[in-house]
Image (spheres, rainbow, N blue to C red):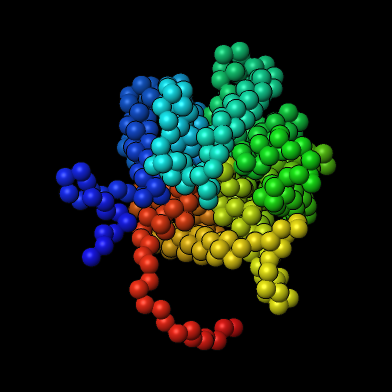
Amino acid sequence: MPSSPLQRRGRFGMRSFRMPPPATLCLIYLSSIIVGAGLLSLPFATAPDVDIGLMTAVFISTSAVTVTGLSTVDVGATFSLFGEVVIAALIQLGGLGLMTFAVMVLSALGIPVGMPQRLILREDLGQTTLNNLTVLVRIILVVALTCELVATCILSFVFIPEFGVAHGMWLALFHAISAFNNAGFSLLPTGLVPYVADPIVNIVIPVLFILGGLGFVVVGDIYQKRSWQRLTLHSKLMLSGSACLIVFGFVTFALLEWTNPGTLGALPSSGQRLWASWFQAVTPRTAGFNTLDTGAMHDSTTMLTMLLMFVGGGSTSTAGGIKVTTLIVLIVATIAFFRRTSGLNIFGRSLKMEEVMKVLALTTVSIILVFVGLFFVSISHDGEFLDLAFEVVSAFGTVGLSRGATAELDGIGLSFIMLMMFAGRVGPLALGFFLATRSAPRVKFAPGQIYLG
């Protein structure tokens, strides 16, 4: 009887078990969460006379590694400088991908990157092939570090006059790392609300998480091609899809919240309202920062934000969600069905049916995960349903926006939120591959017919 894909013969005939790359990736992220929680639990990781407990340490570590940004405590007031550095490091590792750093270390030491490492890296970066993975890793690190350093220098002009040179530079660096990695963590007690009308904050922070959310493949493609006609299909889909979602979110948010006294209506000028609408339109794309009170939004605006959080950003990016390209393929496939066309064509290129099946699987798994998470969270917490749904979608999309329900959850509710963050970061397909093994069918059946609709 043939061995399963997880079993291989050792040198002495013994059966050894090798985990598939998605499962190994899950273990790598899980190990990072455990290490991060251990560091955050150290006495000198928190402010004097502050004891966060193990659950809070695990939750913050999970939120940082999964670049979500949800928190049950005031990060700036709770943690010491050491704890804040640990959180920033976890964000950087989780956002850029732990395997990215591992491959760079191996390359720097002159150690060739073997096939097992390439397979894990492929899952971590959401790629379908093994070609040019190490080149992509270099692009990721160069783009990330350059963007973060430039943003730190610019943001320092905002924070240094208010907080001094040392603390101001640290705030600028921390927020640059958090923004580019789409984490949403802030060291300020009210987040970026005090800077709702600040042009520098409203430009630099969104540019960071838009670049991080577009995906490193897109950024590298733009740098190399510098021409719309020469861009790959993926880059064209990401750029056009992201632009449409940003414009849609901006216009809709402004229309829905313009007179709301809890959000835009509280701002004195139209210019400030437009700045706030712009920021709130782009931040649900898994960034997690806010310049307005999210809990004061209308229910309709909350639903809009949940939709944007569920879609997320792009593949090979620091963003979560089902991804922009997934949404586009779903729309194109639906249009093709109603037009009775057999092929899918976008920007002069055709899509394989395998891509459509992958999109359907990803969307189905994502919807099931969100509903299951909401079901169990609602069992453990009898709160406002819309608030709970918002927290679950935010956790799955690794966004970090909150309407205040997360801080009120008990241990069971927080555990399920952590599971949602983990699933949203590692990827529904990776978890699906982890839970199921492929097997070649031994018997082929005659085709059947079912009735739909």
Which residue is located at x 37 percent, y 55 percent?
A: 434
**Image quarter of the N terminus:** bottom left
Q: Is residue 267 visible?
A: no
Q: Is residue 117 above or below residue 252?
A: above
Q: Is residue 263 above or below residue 89?
A: below
Which residue is located at x 53 percent, y 39 percent?
A: 133
Q: Is residue 239 left or right of residue 313?
A: right
Which residue is located at x 70 percent, y 31 percent?
A: 204
Q: Is residue 295 above or below residue 142?
A: below
Q: Is residue 395 left or right of residue 437?
A: right
**Tag count in the figure?**
0
Q: In front here: 265 or 121? A: 121
State which quadrant residue 248 falls in: bottom right
Q: In front here: 109 or 148? A: 109
Q: Is residue 345 visible?
A: yes
Q: Is residue 339 left or right of residue 43?
A: right
**Image quarter of the C terminus:** bottom right
Percent x, y for residue 166? 57, 13
Which residue is located at x 40 percent, y 44 percent?
A: 25
Q: In front here: 304 or 34? A: 34
Q: Is residue 137 above or below residue 384?
A: above
Percent x, y for residue 65? 45, 38
Percent x, y for residue 208? 65, 34
